[in-house]
Image (tube, helix red, strand yellow):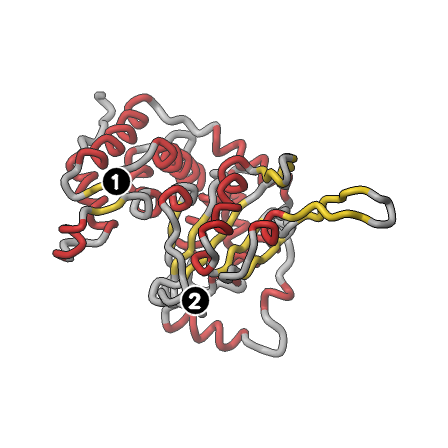
Amino acid sequence: MTVQEYAAKLRENISKVIKGKDEAVDIVIMAILAGGNILLEDFPGTGKTVLAKAFAKSISGKFNRIQFTPDLLPSDVTGIHFFDMKNQEFVFREGPIFANILLADEINRATPRTQSALLECMEEKQATVDGVRFGLPKPFTVIATQNPIETQGTYPLPEAQLDRFMIKLSLGYADRQSEIEVLENVKAAHPIDSLSPVTDAAEMIEMSNAVDTVAVNEAVRGYIADIGAASRTSSDIKLGLSTRGLISIKKMAQARAALRGREYVTPDDVKYVLPYTAAHRIICRSAIMRDNSGSKAEIIKRLTEQVPVPTESI
């Protein structure tokens, strides 16, 4: 089975509960196959939680959800050693991070101390508790959500954590026809309850390995590096793309090429994934924000227009 066929199978299954969002579903598939974490910023009721559950069910993976609140502790996320009175020894009780798909719901409502408990998990796929390291299940993906309009009682995500999300995505509202279908499907039981797996974790790992083999030639690698350099010297941007950000761009471009049935990455793949992989990583200068001279996505677009695109002759 090719990555393209695999993605189509996943998309078809998820579309049974997520209507009219095939492009967004594809982007999430790309991020998961690329081994990345996902930040969903959208209004309540747009399907963020259902999307995470649908992915977990589709891959027959373990799904856990953490409702982030101000009183949540790091040990509530990673787990804790407790003393077993019967056996007279300390035993580790796993936290909810030990899953294939972890939904970090309203992640910006937890304190920075608790948010930081996810940093090692997201980047190194492991957790350290009381000096002991525990590997996380494979595959492991964090799908975090936050509300873009409600700021009371929230703690903005620090740059170090934002940089660990491979993509930031908004689902948006469904179109009229899709909402009519959703209304038709709403019955006594939620449609996701009857969703069946179409793959498993082992096959997903195999597809992820296939994505890693998609060729990225020197010209395209140079194009990605030039975009990174341009972001660091732009007069509009205070903080440009990190090296981790450039790696995310490359991996997402590989995943997009694989979903299109290609064994090589083109500059168009890079351009397509940039708004999702780069916009949340940059910090604009205060004057730009005050003047409302464009969203981060528009700034990224202007930036790429200034970077020469490699051609076959290069």
Mark positioned earlier in the residue sequence (2 or 1): 2
**Residue at 40%, 61% in the rendered image:** 154
Q: Nearer the viewer, residue 145 or 80?
A: 80
Q: Secondary structure at mark 1?
A: strand
Please identify the quadrant where the N terminus is shown.
Answer: top right
Q: Nearer the viewer, residue 21 or 128?
A: 128
Q: Amino acid at mark 2?
A: Thr
Q: Secondary structure at mark 2?
A: loop
Q: Residues within 10 Å of mark 2 (few under 14, many from 20)?
A: some
- Residue 15 visible to an observer of this rendering: no
Q: Amino acid at mark 1?
A: Leu
Q: x, y percentage for residue 11?
A: 50, 53
In the image: residue 52, left or right of residue 267: right
Q: x, y percentage for residue 13?
A: 55, 56
The mark tally for this picture is 2
Calculate the distance from the C-alpha at mark 2 to the C-alpha at mark 1. Answer: 31 Å
**Residue at 18%, 31% in the rendered image:** 308
Query: Where 146 sits versus 166, above or below?
Result: below
Answer with the quarter of the image where residue 88 lies. top right
- Residue 267 visible to an observer of this rendering: yes
Residue at image mark 2: 46
Query: Where 203 sits versus 10, above or below?
Result: above
Q: Nearer the viewer, residue 27 or 150?
A: 150
Answer with the quarter of the image where residue 261 lies. top left
Residue at image mark 1: 239
Q: Residues within 10 Å of mark 1 (few under 14, many from 20)?
A: some
In the image: residue 9, left or right of residue 229: right
